[in-house]
Image (cartoon, rainbow, N blue to C red):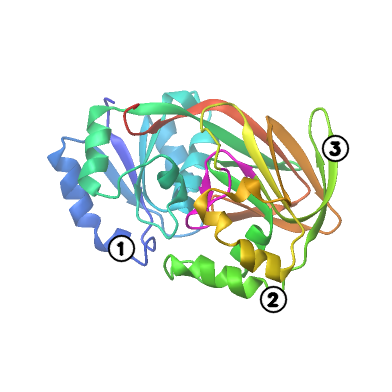
Amino acid sequence: MHGPWLVVLNPISGQGRAMQHRHEIEAVLRRHGIDFTLEISDRPEHAIEIVSRAIAGGCRHVLAVGGDGTVNECVNGIFRQDAVATTAVTLGVMPIGTGNDWARGLHMPKDYAEVAALMAAGTSRLHDVGLAEFGDVKRYFINVAGIGFDAHVVESLPDRTLGPMAYLVGLVKGLLSYTAVSLRLTFTERKLDARAFVLFFAIGRYCGSGMNVAPQAEADDGLFDVTLVQELSRWEVLKSLRRLFDGTLLTHPKVLAMRETGGAVETTLAQPVEADGELIGHAPVRFSILPRALNVVAQPSR
């Protein structure tokens, strides 16, 4: 991976650790011979602007220092520019966020030196990217998009810098105010009406700080793993919580699993949609997959 890197640092990621460790991260990158420019994102969607502008100026390598939200903004910056094909850009992450779910799915190390070593070695792979369309508004994502309880929790969290317990606390509190969503799913060859507890369109396997919502997902197969959890009582949710984390979610009798290249979701009332842990719009929404559309820093193939 020749050429300088743009390092985008989110100063509030990891309860401020990203900013606290800035000089350590810079020193590690220099020790591994990585030429870089560091910029700090200081407001929502600022990283989108930073990345898009840098690519237009010739940058081809981007490192997100933060969590899934920082990665999401970097992805959108890559896909909102038209200077080069998105496959000509490489994206990496130093996972210093609350959930780090995308990095978890890629088995990315948390150690800064190990990430820098992967960058220096040029180990990468092509990765699918999702597109969510709300009418004329487009939002890209690289991990998991959710509608229903998942988005309800994200919308209700007052501060996602509280650490990895924040989502779990929000999940339990959210049960008291949440009601199932009536929705219609339209795929290429079928339609499905359901009362949904939650619906996921997944590229990666994890979301919500380690919930394994798509245990069979592959990040480069050109398909979403669509996981529909049908309406559950509060007791059923509490009884099944372990399934969200231990990889057995798909064995639950009220869970439907499908593989699709895309789909449209209509709801009777406007419902929030989250992707990569960030609120991105409200249903109705159309999802489509962009196969192997981005190069990402990854562990060597096993």
Residue drawn 47% across the image and 60% down it: 43
**Front residue (pair 299, 61):** 299
Element under label 2?
loop
Q: Amino acid at mark 3?
A: Lys
Q: Which mark is residue 176?
A: 2
Q: Is residue 286 above or below residue 43?
A: above
Instruction: Give the amino acid type for the residue marked by disc 1 in the picture.
Output: Arg
Query: Looking at the picture, does residue 171 appear above or below residue 55?
Result: below
Whether label 2 touches label 3, CB < 8 Å: no
Q: Give the quarter of the image for residue 63.
A: top left
Q: Residues within 10 Å of mark 1 (few under 14, many from 20)?
A: some
Give above or below for 168 relative to 128.
Answer: below
Seen at 37% across and 30% down, the residue is: 60
- For disc 3, the marked residue is 191
Residue in the image at 72% along x and 50% along y: 253
Horizontally, residue 301 falls left or right of residue 150, namely left
* Disc nearer the start of the sequence (1/3): 1
Query: For the residues marked 1 and 3, what is the alpha-carbon distance in whole angstroms?
Result: 45 Å
Q: Looking at this view, is 247 or 269 the one in front? A: 247
Q: Earlier in the sequence, mark 2 or mark 1?
A: 1
Indicate the quadrant containing the N terminus: top left, top right, bottom left or bottom right: top left
Task: Please state the extent of the stretch shown in magenta in the rendering.
Answer: 201-214
Any part of residue 46 in sight: no
